[in-house]
Image (spheres, helix red, strand yellow):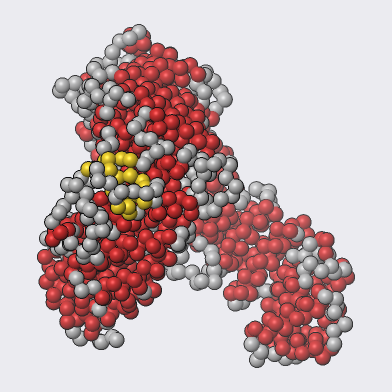
């Protein structure tokens, strides 16, 4: 047992009102721990608390009772015998009469009634006695907020878990609950109170029983709370939201049908409220209450509800959007309105509940009859008055809900309203028969209003049949007999003639109607096969002939997509066969037909959209596209348009078809076969250079090859690389086992366009490989890449960088003799000697030579005096460096030092003879800008995110935070070189290179060094304004400056240079070459207006004068920013207090 002195100390600490809350909690936790560890029994605690529980000091007594209650709350998992529980119930229920100790009594009672049977729980008689004591002694609304919440929690739990025990209290219980709820305002208490009413309705469910006698009294308590409206923000202690409280009140309203005489009139009254939330709540409550009260009780209100619903739809239903941008598969697209959604949901609920009564009201309604009787006058949408449009839209929505809700309601509206409209338009039985036999409906007789309502009816009907198992209903028979009429009507409205072009609403209605007709299940709405095929023929004729009507063409293509997706999804085999025959096959035929006027770009778009209808169709189209690609590639040399066609097909394959196939789980073998077929084509084009002379076509082929290989597995990539290597070695003049001699004359190698094209295609494969894919003869390829990158073939340099990025850093027991480690590959690249012989031959040096031998880095430093060769070497080395930088290799340090040496070296003396044809004027060479500018661009290559290679899409190895580490290592070097540079050219090159590094470095790293970087950043900004080609890097630096201005770390550094920054930005607000530069410069000036007054006020006039000119900028975005900037700087008054 615990020592008495220790227990007493904990009790005294809790009971003492001068103790801090934390000490009181600690004491409570200590006592609970003693009980849980069996160091103290509950009986011993009660004996020790005796003097506190019976003290005449109200504060001590209340604290003692609360201590016992809190202990019981925390030991709810410890078993107690029934005698102990009964004794504690007796104690706490009696304490309810002690108004000073009410909290402790409520906490104690809650702790006891929440106990589970496995650890001992209160009996039914104890629960009843607690309830009786509660009703006898507590005046809930006279208590504080927390105590009231405890009261409601106690009542709620008793009504949930001790129903049988307290049901006999009857009137006393109802009176007590009403008294407790009356005038309650706290949201959390009201949540409990509303739930208590719902539980009370379950306790006395008899509609003519006890609760019915008090229904008016209980409802009078609830009525003031509807609609729920928070007049002020709730405190942070409550998490109750308005919608949660509203749903709980709704459940209370709907809990018993005895509330019906009071609730429904209230809701109908509030439905006319101008308060938006009240209208929505009224509709929601009516829907739920109607469902709960039953059809018999709601029948007498149906007319009033119908009238209110109709008026609500007239008022809140917006004008439909007759476009296919966001159009649903079925029906018409209306602006989103919560009121309309709730109104239609209520209408649907009423139809489900009492179909015959409500549908009769709809059919006999005056406005509905006016619209259907006047349907013949609504020939064109634009000629309908605004008020009649609102009625037409509302009636259309009502018919849509009626048709989709139930079979009886759908039958009723088709038998009455649909046939009535047909009669009004003169579609008699004889006319229908004629149209079914192939007659054509004249376009001038087409009626927009009729077609609009048909769309709504057909949409609702189609939704009904998807969910219904009933077949051959009345509406199905009517639709089947009218299908030819509807096809002709919808088709005629799309007719394009010399004197008629359909408007957007006509296009929407015509296309949507034909689409819905085609998307009915055959076993529910068996439209003739000929009608379905006629719809497809109609759409295809529009695709082929009416491509000049952009809206119509796009809408038709989207409809064909929806139809195709439907027949594939629902396995409509008969329709699917027709679709493939009339759409898929026709689309594929168009690729090879030159006599069709449809532009080829639209053919490709149609090809892709139709392919997306299903994997089977996509693979069929993919095969057709592959055939078209290879046919056009083979004809490039003789057909001038073939290369444009091939480019478009390859772009569609790379950007659309292949991503879709991969996303939808297409088989990899098709992609592998495509890549292999391209290599077969490359091998078969030995006699023609044309496919590889056109840069656009070659780029498209390279892109297609990269994305194809990149998405394949290692096994598939091995197949592709073997095929590619075989073609490269057998169909080009490259001797991959002896690449020692290639002619070099005036900086250009003697490589045919065809050989170069095959090499570039091979480089695309290398770029996309996974790290574990085996590359054959990698040594020979390295030598070949080193030689060819000196020609300036950038993709070869990218392939070399990708290769180095993915090689293993050390050998792990290579399975093949020609596999290299990264270290071996680097040794080949940087230590292989390149020899310039007397006959101007560039060759790999493998022994003694009669000329001068150099390595790749010597070429980068300009040792040959051939600046073009030097530029190509620098460009190639930059991609090699990028591959190493991404993987975090130390060699990147040596590479960057070569680039910086190029930047600061104004002249290098030649150590080998000049190559024939190179520049011999050393005065021009010593400051040659080309090679040194390439060195600045090398830093852009290193830091930028490449799209064509060395990214995660092409499986590059990327070390986390590589940009941050590179910046941290280069920043002190650049800052030192810039500060020591005494040459204007070298300084400008260093600034431009460092600008590339800064603009591509994450901002958080820049902020840490903001004070050091601000002066250099400003020098970069001023220097970059001189050349139009620097506009992108200038914008990048402005974004860095903008980030500094919005972060605390950056602001501290900016303050010291505020006047220089502002002067520099003033010069950029009218920068003519890039809108984003002007816009961002003005935004930076806005941010600078928040700096301390003493720093910026002297420049206020200059800023306002500069911004005044921007108010007339040609771009709206710049003008908008200028207005904000002028307001910000104009508000800076000279009297504003100085802030340092």
Residue name at image x 75 percent, y 59 percent: 162
Residue 1063 visible here: yes
Image coordinates for residue 489, horizontal then vertical, percent: 31, 20
> Is 502 on the left or on the right of 52, as rendered?
left
Residue 112 occupies quadrant: bottom right
Image coordinates for residue 626, horizontal then vertical, percent: 38, 25
Q: Is residue 172 above or below residue 1011?
A: above
> Is 554 on the left or on the right of 725, as rendered?
left
Question: Quarter holding the N terminus?
Answer: bottom right
Residue name at image x 22 percent, y 62 percent: 909
Q: Is residue 241 above or below residue 580?
A: below
Residue name at image x 46 percent, y 20 percent: 576
Residue 360 occupies quadrant: top left
Q: Nearer the viewer, residue 1069 or 207?
A: 1069
**What count of labels does the image hold?**
0
> Is 1124 on the left or on the right of 116, as rendered?
left
Q: Nearer the viewer, residue 174 or 682?
A: 682
Image coordinates for residue 1117, horizontal then vertical, percent: 21, 58
Image coordinates for residue 1127, horizontal then vertical, percent: 20, 71
Q: Nearer the viewer, residue 1006 or 597?
A: 1006
Residue name at image x 35 percent, y 31 percent: 732
Question: Quarter holding the C terminus?
Answer: bottom left
Residue 213 visible here: no
Q: Is residue 539 above or below residue 406?
A: above
């Amino acid at each position: 047992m615990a020592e008495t002195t220790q227990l007493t100390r904990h009790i005294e600490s809790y009971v003492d009102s001068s103790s801090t809350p934390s000490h009181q909690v600690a004491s409570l936790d200590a006592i609970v721990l003693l009980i849980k560890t069996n160091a103290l029994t509950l009986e011993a605690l009660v004996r020790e608390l005796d003097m506190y529980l019976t003290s005449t000091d109200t504060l001590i007594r209340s604290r003692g009772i609360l201590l016992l209650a809190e202990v019981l709350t925390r030991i709810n998992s410890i078993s107690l015998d029934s005698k102990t529980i009964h004794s504690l119930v007796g104690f706490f229920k009696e304490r309810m009469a002690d108004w000073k100790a009410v909290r402790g009594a409520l906490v104690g009672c809650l702790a006891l009634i929440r106990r589970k049977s496995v650890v001992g729980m209160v009996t039914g008689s104890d629960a009843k006695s607690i309830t009786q004591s509660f009703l006898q002694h507590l005046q809930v609304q006279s208590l504080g907020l927390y105590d009231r919440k405890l009261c409601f929690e106690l009542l709620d739990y008793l009504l949930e878990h001790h129903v049988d025990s307290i049901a006999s209290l009857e009137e006393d219980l109802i009176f007590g609950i009403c008294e407790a709820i009356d005038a309650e305002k706290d949201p959390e208490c009201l949540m409990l109170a509303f739930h208590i009413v719902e539980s009370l309705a379950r306790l006395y469910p008899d509609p003519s029983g006890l609760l019915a006698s008090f229904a008016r009294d209980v409802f009078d308590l609830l009525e003031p709370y509807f609609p729920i409206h928070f007049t002020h923000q709730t405190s942070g202690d409550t998490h109750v939201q308005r919608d949660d409280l509203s749903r709980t009140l709704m459940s209370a309203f709907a809990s018993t049908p005895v509330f019906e005489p009071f609730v429904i009139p209230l809701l109908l009254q509030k439905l006319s409220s101008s308060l938006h939330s009240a209208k929505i709540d009224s509709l929601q409550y009516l829907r739920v209450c109607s469902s709960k009260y039953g059809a018999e009780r709601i029948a007498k209100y149906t007319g009033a509800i119908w009238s209110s619903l109709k008026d609500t739809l007239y008022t809140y239903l917006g004008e439909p959007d007759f476009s296919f941008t966001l159009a649903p598969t079925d029906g018409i697209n209306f602006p989103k309105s919560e009121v309309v959604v709730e109104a239609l949901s209520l209408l649907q609920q009423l139809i489900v509940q009492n179909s015959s009564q409500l549908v009769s009201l709809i059919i006999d309604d005056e406005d509905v009859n006016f619209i259907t009787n006047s349907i013949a006058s609504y020939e064109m949408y634009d000629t309908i008055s605004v008020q009649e449009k609102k009625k037409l839209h509302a009636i259309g929505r009502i018919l849509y809900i009626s048709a989709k809700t139930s079979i009886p309601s759908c039958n009723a509206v088709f038998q009455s309203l649909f046939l009535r409209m047909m009669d009004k338009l003169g579609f008699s039985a004889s006319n229908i028969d004629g149209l079914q036999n192939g007659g054509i409906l004249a376009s001038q007789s087409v009626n927009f209003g009729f077609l609009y309502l048909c769309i709504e009816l057909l949409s609702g009907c189609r939704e009904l049949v998807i969910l219904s198992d009933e077949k051959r209903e009345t509406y199905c028979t009517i639709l089947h007999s009218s299908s030819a009429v509807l096809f002709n009507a919808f088709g005629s409205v799309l007719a394009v003639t010399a004197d008629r072009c359909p408007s957007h609403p006509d296009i929407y209605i015509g296309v949507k109607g034909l689409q819905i007709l085609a998307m009915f299940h055959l076993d529910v709405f068996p439209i003739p096969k000929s009608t379905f095929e006629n719809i497809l023929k109609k759409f295809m004729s529009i695709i082929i002939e009416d491509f000049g009507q952009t809206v119509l063409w796009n809408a038709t293509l989207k409809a064909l997509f929806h139809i195709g997706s439907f027949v594939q999804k629902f396995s409509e085999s008969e329709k699917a066969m027709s679709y493939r025959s009339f759409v898929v096959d026709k689309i594929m035929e168009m690729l090879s037909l030159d006599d069709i006027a449809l532009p080829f770009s639209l053919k490709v778009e149609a090809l892709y959209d139709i392919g997306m209808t299903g994997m089977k169709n996509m693979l069929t189209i993919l095969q057709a596209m592959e055939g078209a690609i290879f046919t056009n590639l083979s004809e490039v040399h003789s057909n001038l348009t073939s290369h444009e066609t091939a480019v478009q097909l390859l772009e569609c394959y790379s950007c659309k078809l292949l991503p879709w196939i991969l996303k939808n789980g297409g088989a990899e073998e098709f992609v592998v076969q495509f890549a292999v077929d391209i290599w077969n084509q490359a091998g078969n084009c030995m006699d023609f250079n044309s496919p590889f002379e056109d840069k656009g076509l070659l780029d498209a082929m390279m892109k297609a090859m990269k994305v194809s290989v990149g998405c394949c597995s290692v096994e598939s990539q091995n197949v592709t690389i073997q095929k590619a290597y075989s073609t490269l070695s057998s169909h080009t003049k490259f001797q991959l086992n002896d690449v020692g001699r290639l002619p070099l004359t005036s900086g250009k190698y003697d490589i045919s366009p065809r050989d170069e094209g095959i090499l570039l295609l091979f480089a695309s494969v290398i770029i996309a490989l996974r790290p574990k894919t085996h590359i054959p003869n990698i040594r020979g390829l390295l030598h070949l890449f080193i030689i060819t990158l000196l020609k300036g073939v950038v993709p070869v340099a990218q392939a070399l960088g990708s290769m180095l990025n993915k090689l293993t850093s050390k050998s792990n027991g290579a399975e093949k003799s020609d596999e290299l480690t990264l270290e071996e590959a680097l040794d080949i690249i940087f230590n292989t000697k390149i020899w310039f012989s007397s006959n101007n031959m560039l060759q790999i040096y493998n022994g003694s030579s009669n000329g001068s031998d150099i390595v790749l880095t010597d070429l980068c430093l300009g040792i040959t005096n051939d600046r073009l060769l030097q530029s190509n070497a620098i460009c190639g080395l930059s991609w090699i460096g990028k591959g190493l930088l991404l993987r975090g290799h130390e060699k990147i340090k040596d590479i960057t030092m070569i680039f910086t040496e190029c930047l600061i070296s104004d002249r290098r003396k030649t150590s080998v003879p000049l190559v024939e044809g190179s520049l011999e004027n050393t005065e021009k060479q010593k400051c040659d800008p080309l090679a040194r500018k390439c060195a600045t661009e090398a830093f852009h290559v290193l830091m930028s995110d490449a799209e064509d290679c060395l990214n995660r899409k092409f499986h590059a190895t990327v070390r986390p935070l590589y940009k941050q580490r590179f910046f941290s290592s280069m920043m002190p070097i650049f800052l030192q070189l810039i500060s020591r540079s005494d040459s204007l050219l070298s300084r400008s090159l260093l600034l431009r290179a460092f600008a590339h590094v800064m603009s591509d470095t994450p901002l958080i790293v820049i902020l840490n060094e903001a004070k050091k970087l601000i002066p250099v950043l400003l020098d970069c900004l001023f220097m970059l304004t001189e050349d139009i080609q620097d506009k992108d890097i200038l914008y990048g630096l402005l974004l860095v400056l903008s980030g500094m201005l919005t972060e605390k770390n950056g602001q501290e550094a900016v303050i010291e240079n505020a006047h220089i920054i502002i002067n520099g930005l003033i010069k950029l607000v009218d920068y003519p070459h890039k809108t984003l530069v002007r816009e961002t410069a003005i935004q930076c000036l806005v941010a600078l207006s928040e700096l301390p007054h003493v720093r910026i006020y002297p420049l206020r006039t200059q800023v306002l004068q500069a911004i005044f000119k921007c108010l007339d900028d040609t771009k709206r975005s710049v003008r908008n920013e200028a207005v904000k900037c002028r307001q910000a700087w104009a508000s800076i008054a000279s009297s504003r207090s100085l802030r340092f």
